[in-house]
Amino acid sequence: MSGAEPGPARVEIYDTTLRDGAQQVGLDLTVEDKLRIAAALDALGVDVVEGGWPGSNPKDKEFFARAGELPWRHAALAAFGATRRPGRSADGDPDLAVLLAAGTPVVTLVGKAWTLHVDEALRTTREENLAMVADSVRFFAREGRRVVFDAEHFFDGYAADPGYALAVLAAAAEAGADTLALCDTNGGTLPDDIVRVVRDVTARFGQLRIGVHCHNDSACAVANSLVAVGEGVRHVQGAANGYGERCGNADLFAVIAGLELKRGHELLPPGRLAELSSVAKLVAEVANLPFEARQPYVGSSAFATKAGLHASAIARRPDAYSHVDPAAVGNQAAVLVSELAGRSNVLARAAELGIELDPALASEVLDEVKAAEHRGYAFEAADASFELLVRRVAARRRPAGTGPDPSPTWFELEGYRVVIERSEGPSGPTDRSEAIVRLLLRDQRVVAVGEGVGPVHALDQALRRALEDLYPELASIRLVDYKVRILDGRAATSAVTRVMLTSADSAGEWTTVGVSDDIVTASWEALADGISYGLLRAGARALVPAAT
Ligand SMILES: [Zn+2]
């Protein structure tokens, strides 16, 4: 080893969770969800975040309109669209105009590279397809946009007619594309074929950045991405947690970890790789999908050995039983979850929130977190619930009469009742719920009624009505998202419901979590925490603690 050799050239990480990943069955992202995921990926340090297809639906259009609200620190935003229509000019194509109007620094254009699709799907001539590619790329390059050209079905196209597939790339390259991304759109290509084809492309187009976009239909999406990088590819497209239609896209987290830990590439800013596991969980929670315990690198079982089996040996030589150090990706060997590791995690998170914990207090918080997670709570995305939990524990151990109460109380619940009503009418059924909330505010008992389209809406209305006189700050707090997930029934108990609720004020958003066998109880918990946290942020004066 000379030590003077230059490191491997930089590989760009291009995330398509919000567009291709969102094609997954059962994955439905709101604009809020997309903004949260984009912010998390940007904070992680991916290079490009593809926001969606602005010409295809109003949701994506709104996303691009609001993307400027995010504090982008690292990533460039890309908008996705297709090449111009056959028989038109690029200037007169309304879809290209919408794509341009999204105003992103990167424009990703997908074009046909397989003759079968040109003939049968596009139903135009092969010459016209080449012109469509060239005209569309030139249109955006002239506007000063960086153009990533996604060569759709490239590997199948190359197998059928290599000359034509390469001519499509040449058309994009000559027109000013910055990156040529070779897409394995059907996901059936195996690694040795990827190597052979990529080798040919990099030999011909070595002056450009070559990328790959792999799907997992033969369980090779990550492997194909890795071997492509070995052949000189410097741009990898994929999705968080491998989301995507059919069998998914390449799992970006496994690609990043593999290239950083095993091939010496520097992809993320220094120190960010250790965030990988928590970002993976956060995206799953926002996407409202179960987090796969067996997911490589980041899953909770990724480094778990059956308890007791090799525990003492693992403790002696952890490197003998895992392919990488779990801490490198922010994960841990389940069998070794030490008090110390968990506690330092809690301390770090609390410090981020500006709360100082002594080690004993951190242990107590850790115990509560573990117990709560066992009951079905998830705190990766529920920042506000985590903070309230830390504050409650801190308040419990606070010597009487010292400093401000870390866990103030704004209201105490005496009880609530919810009535759900459905009535069949001539124009279809109508659903209406009514909630009655009884609170204790200082020495006063307050009863308020709320109506809504569902029980949670009604409870929210009643709670607000009960509190509005005392806390005018409530007027600026609104509910922006509500997610319900039924968790698997544990042992003999029934299934558990987890509710994640996101609230906002003019300065930002926060998320709370509630868990119960009953959906209304879980919702109330998330709601009450969401309102309390909002009042805490607003600096509302808390109730005077009851005299003891
Ligand atoms: Zn795709």
Image (cartoon, rainbow, N blue to C red):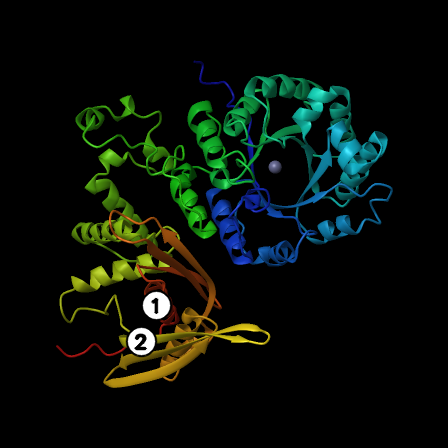
> Quick one: label 2, few (<14), some, or many (20+) residues within 10 Å?
some
Residue furthest to the top in view is 1
The secondary element bearing badge 1 is classed as: helix
Instruction: Report which quarter residue 473 is drawn in.
Output: bottom left
Mark 1 = which residue? Answer: 524
Q: Position of residue 158 (x, y in %)?
A: 70, 22
Count of numbered badges drawn on the protein: 2
The vertical placement of 536 against 14, above or below, is below
**Amino acid type, callout 2:** Tyr
* Residue displayed at 76% across by 36% down: 121
Q: Position of residue 520 (x, y in %)?
A: 35, 66
Instruction: Report which quarter residue 407 is drawn in.
Output: bottom left
> Quick one: label 1, few (<14), some, or many (20+) residues within 10 Å?
many
Which of 498 and 258 lies nearest the eye of the viewer? 498
The secondary element bearing badge 2 is classed as: strand
Q: Is residue 305 visible?
A: yes
Mark 2 = which residue? Answer: 416
* Residue displayed at 36% across by 38% down: 293
View quadrant of ligand 1: top right
Q: Position of residue 460 (x, y in %)?
A: 41, 73
Q: Position of residue 295 (x, y in %)?
A: 40, 35
